[in-house]
Image: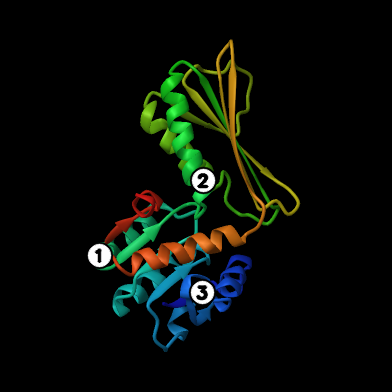
Amino acid sequence: MRILVHGSAGRMGQELIKIIENGYRNSTLAGGVGRNINEFESEADCIIDFSNHESTGNLVAYAVNKKLPLVVATTGHNVEELQIIADAATQIPVFMAANMSLGIALLIELARKTVTMMPDAEIEIVERHHNRKLDAPSGTALLLADEIKDVRNDLVYNLGRRGHKKREKNEIGIHAIRMGNIVGDHEIIVGTDSQTITLRHEAHSRALFAEGAVAAAEFLIKQDAGMYTMKDMLG
């Protein structure tokens, strides 16, 4: 499986290249490019994107033109960029996940079950990342919130709570911390007057995201055109 790494100069791009060059899941490196994917002129079986959402237009146009499966591991997309990706999925297989970690997928399942069993609980999400991360809250924090809201559809998001008023019962607070070199830490706190459950996933190394992306590529190259997520792969 020949992988083209888009965003090869970044931290995650470098991590991805490292595990590919070590032959993870029998992968080989087709090449690496920065934000200008049109510089790549060789052959590949799949593109993994760890660049910046602002490159979405050129990236997707290239993938569609070359009929290459695309793993989108970048976060922070706006509505227009998400639509571009969705349109591409009608022509090529696209895998998109705010977090490539298997552990996060398990955290989601635990969170959904917890809030289902505790329908009156108050819920807060705290995410911590390194001081170079641009988007806040993280795509993973929003993914967790969306999954929780799917089973508690009365919830409304309160991003970075501020002001002078009481907490609303149906709020789900989402808080972002940026400091140091934290790879990624997501915590879900579910509490009532009588008990609290805290669910937490901590990433120790960026390698786990690179490994997940390669696993996604391995899955994706066997699929027809369409939009795929971690749930599809794990299922």
Counting from the top left corner in percent of width and height, residue 95 is at: 37, 60
Give the residue at x 50% y 50%.
Answer: 102
Residue 157's disc number: none
Q: Mark 3, mark 2: which one is toward the viewer?
A: 2
Q: Amino acid at mark 2?
A: Ile
**Residue named by callout 2:** 104
Q: Are marks 2 and 1 in contact (CB under 8 Å)?
A: no
Residue at disc 3, secondary structure: loop
Q: Of the residues under marks 3 and 2, which one precedes in the sequence?
A: 3
Residue at (58%, 76%) from the top-left corner? 22
- The residue tagged 3 is 35
Name the amino acid, label 1.
Ala
Quadrant, the N terminus: bottom left
Discs 2/1, front: 2
User: What secondary structure is found at the residue carrying circle 2?
Assistant: helix
1 or 3: tag closer to the N-terminus: 3
Counting residues from the N terminus, which is met first, the one under dot 2 or under dot 1?
2
Residue 82 figure quarter: bottom left
The reply to whether discs 3 and 2 touch (Cβ–Cβ < 8 Å) is: no
Is residue 180 depicted above or below 24 in this figure? above
Q: For the residue carrying disc 1, how many other residues have a C-alpha within 10 Å: few (<14), some (14-19), or many (20+)?
A: some
State which quadrant residue 56 falls in.
Answer: bottom left
Farthest top residue in view: 194
Q: What residue did someone put label 1 on?
A: 225
Q: Is residue 143 above or below residue 133?
A: above
Amino acid carrying mark 3 in the image: Arg
How many numbered circles are shown?
A: 3
Looking at the image, which is closer to me, 132 or 151?
151
Q: Is residue 184 in sight in this rendering?
A: yes
Q: Decide: is 155 above or below 233.
A: above
In the image shown, does 103 or 89 lie closer to the viewer? Answer: 103
- Above or below residue 150? Residue 18 is below
